[in-house]
Structures are given as C-alpha cells and as structure tokens.
Amino acid sequence: HRVTAQSIIPGILDRKEDQGVVYGSIDFGKTVSSDAKYLTLLQQASKPLRIQEHSVLNEKDKPIVLCSSVECKGIVGNDGRYYILDLLRTFPPDLNFLVLDTEEMPREC
C-alpha cells in the first residue's frame, strides 16, 4: 500500500488554478515556467536524490530549465513559503509494482 499526503497550501483556495504557479506546468507541458528561487531549492534537493537538471521547451520553443518532471507545480503560498506539487513523474516507476507478462493484475488494482 502507499499513502499520499498533502497539506493545504495557504491561499491556494483563494486563487484560480493558473494564478501563483511560478514553476512547472499546469497544462501537461504546453506552457512551462521556471523560477530562480525554485531552481536553487530544487537543486539542493535533487543532488542527493540523483535527479538531473534538464531543459524542456515551452510553447515558444524556448528552453526552460527544470529540476523535476514538467508536471510538477511550484506555488508560493500566502505565507511566503515555496511549495511543490504533483511529484508523480519525478522518480521512475517502482519495479516492485511492475506487472510482469507472467503475472495477472489483481482485480482490486
């Protein structure tokens, strides 16, 4: 089993979805933004996790540097703290949960 927990970002319920996202993408990579403060913070975290900094192209074919998957979203809360959401594709799939050709997937999955 896996448990996922997320705190409510202060002020997130007071804004529209696209407001406040200063890092990543809210539309599956069509528009991508980055922020120097987020890059600095994520570079610190990505080194021990062995996540490599890389560039992706935004809608204007301009390279944007990220230290996460493009689906991640960086939001500055009303409290001034930096939050990052949707880390799903940051790490490769867990091989312990990979279905092999010789196995059947249980119905509950």
Image (cartoon, grey):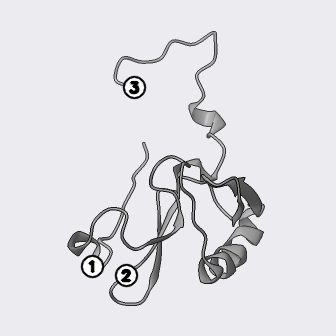
* 26 displayed left or right of 57: left
Give me the disc on residue 109. 3
Residue 55 point in image, percent of width and height: 75, 58
x, y percent for residue 57: 69, 53
The quarter in which the C terminus is drawn is top left
Mark 1, mark 3: which one is toward the viewer?
A: 1
At label 2, which amino acid type do we have? Gly
Nearest the viewer among 109 and 15 is 15
Amino acid beneath label 3: Cys
> Which residue is denoted by mark 1 in the rendering?
11
Earlier residue among tags 2 and 3 = 2
Q: Quadrant of the N terminus?
A: top left
Q: Secondary structure at mark 1?
A: loop
Residue 59 picture location, percent across and down: 60, 52
Q: CA distance from mark 1 to mark 3?
A: 35 Å
Asked whether, in this view, residue 33 is left or right of residue 92, the answer is: left
Instruction: Look at mark 2 in the image and give the residue it sits on.
Output: 77
Secondary structure under the numbered disc 3 in the rendered image: loop
- Sequence-wise first label, 1 or 3: 1
Q: Nearer the viewer, residue 57 or 12?
A: 57
- Dot 1 and dot 2 residues touching (CB under 8 Å): yes
